[in-house]
Amino acid sequence: MPPEAPAAPLPSLAVEWPAPAEIGAFMSTRAGGVSVGPFASLNLGDQVGDAPDAVAQNRLRFARALGAEPVWLRQVHGHRIVDTAAVGQGEVPQGDAAWTDRPGVACVVQVADCLPVLLAARNGRAVGAAHAGWRGLAGGVVEGALRAVASAAGCAADEVVAWLGPCIGPQRFEVGRDVLEAFGIDARGRFTPGPSHDGQPRWMADLPGLTRDRLRRAGVERISGGAWCTVADASRFFSFRRDRVTGRLAAAVWLRS
């Protein structure tokens, strides 16, 4: 059994955005946990092959750092939005985004190259988090989370602020025609030609840029973050594209009690 969680602060990536003081936000790095090997050290994913006891200890440290109750999701690269109020004790619902208007409850998404998107109403009444891989993003997961937060807060989309966390960067995200076509002609500016493989054309995709575009079209005006590449920074971030066997980071947002 791993040792008891320490009282020391957990290393994190600063979430700098114009959210009100009553909203908390946290982005983990890979430091500060008890996992070993490819999962070292703060792996928060329980479906990646890490020792269950280590993941449990890491999640305890994460929850203590938040000071809120995390709601974990079973993510499937889709666009289902989970209402945390409908989640039972110990339940892990399937979905790729969550929202809440209840203080002390944290919406959490896990990533290891996909983009974590945090959302907060400026009136402090609701928050949400979305896991934006290319499939979920193309399917509308970010817009769905935005609608849920705005509806719960009783505000327009332009009164919601967004923060984009670390993800695979535009210089590393090589994709095929299926990804290009999933976003349509209006998004072609976020794709640049890449190297061909076996005669098949490839492109480099700008995941944060695609997300900013969709948020802006949906009405969000204040968008922060999105400047970190998980593939390029092995010291701070897990990356599935880089390592294949790896852990998971987590981003969380909550209303302070």
Image: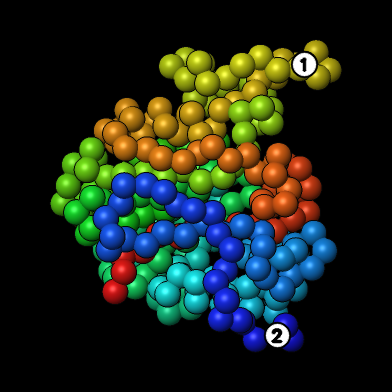
Inter-mark Cα distance, 1 to 2: 49 Å
Left or right: 121 in relation to 95: left
Marked residue nearer the N-terminal end (1 or 2):
2
Q: Mark 2 points at which residue?
A: 3
According to the picture, the residue beneath numbered tag 1 turns out to be: 196
Tags 1 and 2 in contact by the CB under 8 Å rule?
no
Is 166 on the left-hand or right-hand side of 86? right
Judge whether 72 appears above or below 234 on screen: below
Task: Please report the residue visible at 78 percent of the width from the left and 47 percent of the height from the top.
Answer: 243
Q: What residue type is labelled 1?
A: Ser
Q: In which quarter of the image is residue 124?
A: bottom left
- For the point 48% across and 29% down, the residue is 210
Residue type pointed to by label 2 = Pro
Badge 2 element = loop
Tell me residue 89's x, y (percent).
Answer: 43, 79
Frontmost of labels 1 and 2 is: 2
Q: x%, y% of residue 237?
A: 66, 51
Mark carried by residue 154? none
State the residue at coordinates (23%, 38%): 158
Q: How many marks?
A: 2
Can residue 126 be seen here? The reply is: no
Residue that sits furthest to the left in the current view = 154
Most foreground residue, 205 or 83: 205
The residue carrying pointer 2 sits among few (fewer than 14), some (14 to 19) or many (20 or more) residues within 10 Å by Cα, namely: few
Residue occupying the point 66% across, 31% down: 173
Q: Position of residue 19 (x, y in %)?
A: 30, 51
Q: Is residue 149 above or below residue 190?
A: below
Element class at badge 1: loop
Residue extending furthest front? Answer: 8
Instruction: Where is residue 150? Give x, y as percent.
Output: 24, 48
